[in-house]
Image (cartoon, rainbow, N blue to C red):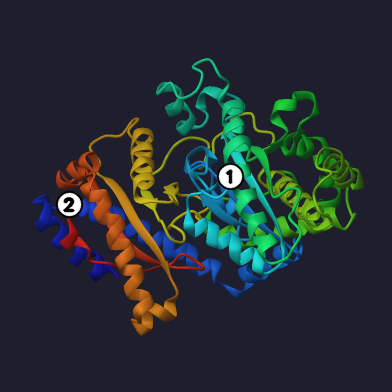
């Protein structure tokens, strides 16, 4: 792998006439090594057993999360491995109008076909579409929404969280709902009354807020965690766990499995009614009142999502911090990644930040990269931007070097060519200001399997 990377970077340097420095080569290699260290843990039987159990607790429902490309939203903590993730600026799905009836549907064929596969399995679907912010200081909120405001695409005086929720509820949620229920009807299955719900994610506390706009009637996992933490302490002290037990450890890769095991332990105790029954009752009553149209299995899955988040906030202690200072409390993205098919590297890392997006087309990929650069630019000193151009592959297809692999390689090359041909990004690549790194990643654990030498397209 190291030889593949060095050979590609040598050829890239020849084409751009800008030598990729030893320092930048090391930066890239360290990201790949770190990503693969995470992938190794995700593939460990003990960790996979934890994930399997969490999926059992949401049996009958396919859980999906749509959230912003912001590096302060760690996929490993917001959705773990029990939910699918789709990352797009501000959680705003790019849509098209269907010619037959004018209804909006997602522009991303990859997203749509993923939804088709879920419908074929006849499971209910629950997509949670997140706006995000920093609740203690709304000026440190979503960079994509700030960019919209600066471009006069939304009211300059608008509350960014409320404006983000409006976009989600008027665009993202109807689009996903329309296409998913269409697939269900084609299979002769009754459409779901609710396919998606919106929520707000707080990057400081990792908290989830439902019905943010209702103020007095909203539900906050942060408030629930703080309200019940003493009762949880009394029960879990026998397991040597208390509020904030993993405060200093939860971002350390060597504790990822142990942390995940203990989060599951807290979840199961609450769901089984062994501790703080009022906590579970409060969540269930809230969902019954404000989400009455969810199916029974959707409601149970939603309950799991909230209890799981409370367990996470309880063990990290993030729900009640005098000084917020953790790996995701501020922008510290060190690289960018895009993938039009499948997933990107890095998003399951419990410590290192990276921007990642799953755009529906090359034009949107270019827009997303420019958004990432605009945010990364703050405080940046004489560093080249590292951009991973990713595509997912089954390790078997890679080994067999078959036609599937050929199509995947062609898809990756096509995206890179479109990025290079963009006037602004192309110039930055020619000057060595952006270093594109085409990679194939394993479709399950996101291990980097191959660095592709697409330098001939640059």
Q: Of helix, strand and loop, which one carries label 2?
A: loop
Q: Of helix, strand and loop, which one carries label 1?
A: loop
In the displayed structure image, the side of residue 54 where residue 235 appears, left or right: right
Q: Residue 223 is drawn in which quadrant? A: top right
The 10 Å Cα crowd at callout 1, few under 14, some 14 to 19, many 20 or more, is some
| Label total for image | 2
Locate the C terminus by quadrant. Answer: bottom left
The 10 Å Cα crowd at callout 2, few under 14, some 14 to 19, many 20 or more, is few
- Can residue 133 be seen? no
In the displayed structure image, the side of residue 63 where residue 325 appears, left or right: left
Residue that mark 2 sits on: 21
- Can residue 89 be seen? yes
Of pointers 2 and 1, the one earlier in the residue sequence? 2
Q: Residue 189 is drawn in which quadrant? A: bottom right
- Residue that extends furthest to the bottom in the rendered view of this protein: 400
Q: Residue 134 is drawn in which quadrant? A: top right
Locate the N terminus by quadrant. Answer: bottom left
- Residue that extends furthest to the front in the rendered view of this protein: 100
In the displayed structure image, the side of residue 200 where residue 372 appears, left or right: left
Residue 243, x across and y down, in percent: 74, 44
Residue 323, x across and y down, in percent: 59, 30
Residue 14, x across and y down, in percent: 9, 58
Q: Residue at x 86, y 46 (%)?
A: 284
Q: Nearer the viewer, residue 122 or 83?
A: 122
Disc marking residue 103:
1
Residue 313, x across and y down, in percent: 69, 44
Please say if 438 is above or below 357.
below
In the displayed structure image, the side of residue 439 where residue 313 appears, left or right: right
Q: Residue at x 54, y 41 (%)?
A: 91
Disc marking residue 81:
none
Real-space Cα distance between discs 2 and 1? 50 Å
């Amino acid at each position: 792998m190291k030889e593949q990377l060095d050979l590609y970077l040598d050829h890239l340097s020849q084409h751009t006439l800008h030598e990729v420095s030893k320092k930048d080569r090391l930066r890239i290699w360290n990201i790949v090594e770190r990503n693969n260290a995470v992938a190794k843990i995700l593939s460990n039987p003990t960790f996979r057993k934890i994930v399997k159990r969490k999926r059992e607790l949401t049996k009958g429902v396919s859980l999906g999360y749509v959230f912003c490309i912001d590096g302060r939203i760690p996929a490993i903590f917001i959705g773990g491995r029990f939910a699918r993730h789709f990352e797009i600026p501000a959680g705003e799905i790019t849509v098209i109008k269907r010619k037959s009836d004018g209804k909006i549907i997602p522009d991303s064929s990859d997203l749509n076909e993923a939804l088709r596969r879920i419908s074929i399995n006849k499971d209910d679907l629950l997509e949670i579409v997140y706006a995000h912010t920093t609740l203690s200081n709304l000026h440190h909120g979503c960079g994509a929404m700030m960019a919209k405001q600066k471009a006069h695409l939304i009211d300059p005086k608008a509350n960014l969280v409320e404006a983000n929720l409006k976009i989600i509820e008027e665009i993202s949620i109807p689009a996903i709902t329309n296409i998913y229920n269409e697939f269900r009807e084609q299979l002769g299955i009754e459409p779901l009354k609710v396919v998606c719900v919106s929520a707000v994610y707080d990057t400081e506390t990792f908290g989830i807020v439902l019905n943010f706009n209702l103020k007095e009637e909203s539900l906050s996992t942060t408030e629930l965690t703080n309200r019940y933490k003493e009762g949880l302490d009394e029960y879990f002290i026998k397991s040597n766990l208390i509020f904030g037990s993993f405060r200093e450890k939860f971002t350390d890769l060597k504790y990822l499995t142990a942390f995940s095991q203990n989060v599951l332990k807290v979840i199961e105790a609450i769901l089984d009614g062994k501790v703080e029954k009022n906590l579970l009752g409060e969540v269930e009553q809230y969902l019954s009142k404000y989400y009455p149209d969810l199916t029974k299995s959707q409601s149970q899955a939603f309950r799991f999502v909230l209890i799981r988040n409370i367990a996470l906030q309880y063990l990290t202690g993030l729900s009640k911090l005098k000084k917020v200072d953790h790996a995701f409390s501020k922008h510290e993205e060190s690289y960018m990644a895009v993938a039009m098919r499948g997933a990107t590297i890095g998003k399951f890392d419990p410590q290192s930040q990276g921007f990642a997006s799953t755009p529906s087309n090359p034009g949107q990929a270019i827009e997303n990269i420019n958004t990432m650069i605009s945010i990364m630019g703050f405080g940046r000193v004489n560093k080249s931007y590292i951009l991973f151009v990713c595509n997912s592959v089954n390790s078997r297809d890679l080994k067999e070097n078959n036609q599937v692999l050929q199509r995947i390689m062609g898809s990756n090359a096509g995206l890179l060519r479109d990025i290079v041909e963009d006037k602004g990004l192309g110039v930055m690549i020619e000057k060595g200001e952006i270093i594109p790194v085409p990679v194939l990643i394993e479709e399950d654990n996101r291990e980097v399997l191959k660095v592709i030498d697409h330098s001939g397209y640059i």
